[in-house]
Image (tube, grey):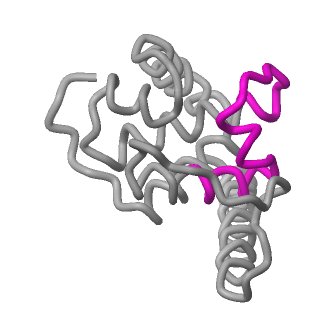
Amino acid sequence: MSMSRELDEDAIREHIRDRLAEQQADALSGRPTCRAGRSRSTGSRSLAVDRIAVATAALFRVGLADLFGRSKAKSILEARLCAYYVARRCTRLSYPELGRAFGRDHSTVLSAVQRMGALVARDHWLGAAVAELCERFGEIEEEREQ
């Protein structure tokens, strides 16, 4: 790995840490961290999925409602895929459970997790974002087959 590439990745990680710190400071001060700014009924969603969704929405600067919505805009779609991927890696929830938590079918979440795995390998910023979120939420050891 070249020195400039390492510096770029370090700069990306620092930027992501700064944005997560801003989000945490906003949460402590009571300011909304997402454009939606509304509380959402969680229903059957787990607290871990909610925390991952809020952090992902703040990192990608999209609304929490957008993250759970149907928009296919690239920025929103990438944030949604990232949330699915991080939730899969940082919780012990099955694909059907994740699908219910995000209001989607389990096959949608499965496809998104596989797609995000390929995107992370190609896109340094997404890779750094996923790594930072997984570090924050405690990636679990992969005991199950992906």
Q: Is residue 25 above or below residue 106?
A: below
Q: Quadrant of residue 110?
A: top left
Residue lying farthest left?
A: 143
Dominant SS type (magenta): helix
Q: Quadrant of residue 123?
A: top right
Magenta range = 53-77
Please check the rendered image and state whether residue 40 is part of the magenta-colored stretch, yes or no. Answer: no
**Which residue is rendered at x = 78% and y = 61% of the image?**
37
The front one of 109 and 101 is 101
Tally of marks: 0
Please check the rendered image and state whether residue 56 is part of the magenta-colored stretch, yes or no. Answer: yes
Horizontal and vertical percent position of residue 38: 74, 59
The front one of 103 and 22 is 103
Q: Is residue 29 above or below residue 85?
A: below
**Which residue is rendered at x = 60% and y = 30% of the image?**
81
**Which residue is rendered at x = 42% and y = 61% of the image?**
137
Horizontal and vertical percent position of residue 49: 45, 49
**Which residue is rendered at x = 64% and y = 34% of the image?**
80
Horizontal and vertical percent position of residue 69: 71, 30
Q: Tell me if 43 is positioned left or right of 22 in this view.
A: left
